Image (cartoon, helix red, strand yellow):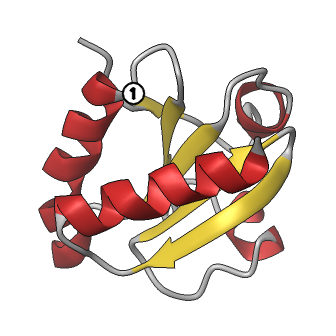
Amino acid sequence: MAKPEAVTDATFEEEVLKSELPVLVDFWADWCQPCKMIAPIVDELSDEYDGKVKFMKVDVDANSHVPTHLGIRSIPTLIVFKDGQPIDQIVGAMPKAQLKRRLDSALETAS
């Protein structure tokens, strides 16, 4: 079972920007209720897309450089990266089917 892995300011470039696979990064915080609502959905998607998409999580309270650099103002924010570039950004919690459509669309567009 693939689960989203934690990524930090220090490991973001190596784990996300230099990844050969597309990467979905979940920017979250422990106190954020919508983040807690979307976390199980992101976990399920990480299983479904295992080997096709890498799933990472950034705790914005412990890692402020990357979220600030990317202009993240609300959480949860999910950003899909391909070849080191953001190709889609999703702000707020949403149902699994809608999130899956957005991810599929981003991956098709980026191919």
Q: Residue at x 54, y 49 (%)?
A: 25
**Quadrant in the rendering for residue 100:** bottom left
| Above-or-below relation of 96 to 77 | above
- Determine the secondary structure under disc 1: loop
What quarter of the picture does the C terminus occupy? Answer: top right
* 62 on left or right of 29: right
Q: Which residue is mark 1?
A: 49
Label 1: few (<14), some (14–19) or many (≥20) C-alpha neighbours in 10 Å: few
Q: Nearer the viewer, residue 96 or 93?
A: 96
Q: Is residue 84 in sight in this rendering?
A: yes
| Above-or-below relation of 31 to 40 | below
Q: Is residue 59 in sight in this rendering?
A: no
**Quadrant in the rendering for residue 93:** bottom left
Q: Position of residue 83 (x, y in %)?
A: 86, 38
Q: Position of residue 73 (x, y in %)?
A: 58, 88
| Above-or-below relation of 31 to 39 | below
Q: Residue at x 14, y 47 (%)?
A: 40
Q: Position of residue 94 (x, y in %)?
A: 24, 74
Q: Residue at x 26, y 61 (%)?
A: 30
**Quadrant in the rendering for residue 2:** top left
* 92 on left or right of 15: left
The amino acid beneath tag 1 is Tyr
